[in-house]
Image: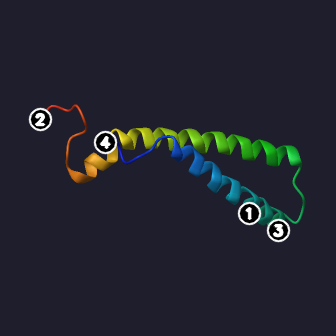
């Protein structure tokens, strides 16, 4: 079993985005000194949630296969033939 759990990576990204999105829109509101339409907020939230979730799931899958971890340790990825 790998130490990277592919199923938890999108959930962690979603929780982080759930906390960061409102902060970003408050900062945007303070900077621009005007409101933001709810449809823009909804679309930005959902599209970034989707993209972050896919990105994190893909990276967790790759790392779980031994990608960057194996490279950092100097060991070959699983299934690689020795030279």
Secondary structure under tag 3 reads: helix
Quadrant in which the N terminus is drawn: top left
Secondary structure under tag 2 reads: loop
- First in sequence, mark 3 or 1: give its number: 1
Q: Residues within 10 Å of mark 1 (few under 14, many from 20)?
A: few
The residue drawn where x is 59% and y is 47% is: 11
Determine the CA span between mark 2 and mark 4.
Answer: 15 Å
**Mark 4 or mark 1: which is in front?**
4
The residue drawn where x is 45% and y is 42% is: 59
Quick one: 33 or 9, which is closer to the camera? 9
- First in sequence, mark 3 or 2: give its number: 3
- First in sequence, mark 2 or 4: give its number: 4
Q: Quadrant of residue 46?
A: top right
Q: Which residue is mark 3?
A: 30
Which mark is drawn over residue 82?
2
Residue 60 pos. (x, y %) = 44, 43
- First in sequence, mark 4 or 1: give its number: 1
Most distant residue in the bottom direction: 30
Q: Which residue is mark 4?
A: 66
Q: Are marks 4 and 1 in contact (CB under 8 Å)?
A: no
Q: Which residue is mark 1?
A: 23
Residue 23 pos. (x, y %) = 74, 63
Most distant residue in the front direction: 1
Determine the CA span between mark 4 and mark 1.
Answer: 35 Å
Determine the CA span between mark 4 and mark 3.
Answer: 44 Å
Which mark is drawn over residue 44?
none
């Amino acid at each position: 079993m790998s130490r990277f759990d592919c199923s938890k990576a999108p959930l962690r990204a979603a929780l982080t985005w759930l906390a960061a999105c409102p902060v970003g829109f408050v900062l945007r509101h303070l900077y621009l000194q005007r409101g933001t339409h709810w449809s823009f907020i909804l679309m930005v939230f959902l599209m970034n949630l989707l993209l972050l979730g896919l990105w994190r799931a893909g990276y967790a899958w790759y790392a779980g296969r031994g990608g960057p971890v194996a490279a950092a340790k100097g060991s070959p990825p699983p299934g690689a033939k020795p030279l």
